[in-house]
Image: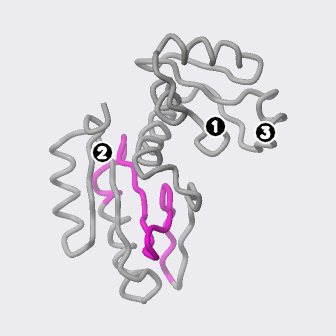
Amino acid sequence: MSQCSYLSRSQIQTMHNIGSTRTAQRVMQQLSEYVSSFMDGEKVYYLNAEGRKLTGCKKVCKKLTTAKHYIMRNYLFIAYGCPDGWKNEMRLKYKDVNVVADALFEEEGKFCLIEIDHTQKMSANKIKIEKYKKLISYGKLKSPTFIWMTTTEYRRKQLLKMCEGLDVQIFTITDFY
């Protein structure tokens, strides 16, 4: 939980192979001394002060409107098998380019960059893509795979057009429900 910041009940079920919703809810209730929760379609859990102390986690999470962004990123984390080398919020900087990837991991010797498009303006996405293209042209990113998750099919098509020439996979949140 410390790596993911926020996890929905269904994500916890998937990650820990818990068969039923009731069992997952009961387990999380037993952990209530260490986790807090709020409703966002389903229960979303995060470490409270006691949980952070127990796990050594430094990141303080609260009930935030940005939690959906983390939940979307976690779907990709789970879908790619919870890679050991997964790193959240990775800054990539070289010369005049400074960009923060939502997450990054390596698969078969190739970097995979995760981008979550939850409430981002498309113009901001375009700027970010241009920064990535610049890093590639500088030779700082060697043929990475870009993995995006967005909210609608329309936004997926827009991102696909902007990422032309890149190795890209674009999912919508509905691909994971």
| Residue 156: percent from left, percent from top | 21, 50
- Residue at 36% of width from left, 87% of height from top? 137
Label whose residue precedes the other's in the sequence (2 or 3): 3
Please determine whether, in this image, residue 120 is positioned above or below residue 8. below
Q: What residue type is labelled 2?
A: Thr
First to last magenta residue range: 96-125
| Residue 150: percent from left, percent from top | 30, 45
- Residue at 63% of width from left, 37% of height from top? 1
Residue that badge 2 annotates: 150
Magenta stretch prevailing secondary structure: strand
Dot 3 alpha-carbon crowd within 10 angstroms: few under 14, some 14 to 19, many 20 or more? few
Label whose residue precedes the other's in the sequence (1 or 2): 1
**Can residue 161 be found in the magenta stretch?**
no
Q: Residue 15 carries which label?
A: none
| Residue 94: percent from left, percent from top | 53, 82
Q: What residue type is labelled 3?
A: Thr
**Can residue 117 be found in the magenta stretch?**
yes
Residue that badge 1 annotates: 1
Residue that badge 3 annotates: 55
Is 6 positioned to the left or the right of 112 in the image? right
Q: Which amino acid does label 1 sit on?
A: Met
Dot 2 alpha-carbon crowd within 10 angstroms: few under 14, some 14 to 19, many 20 or more? many
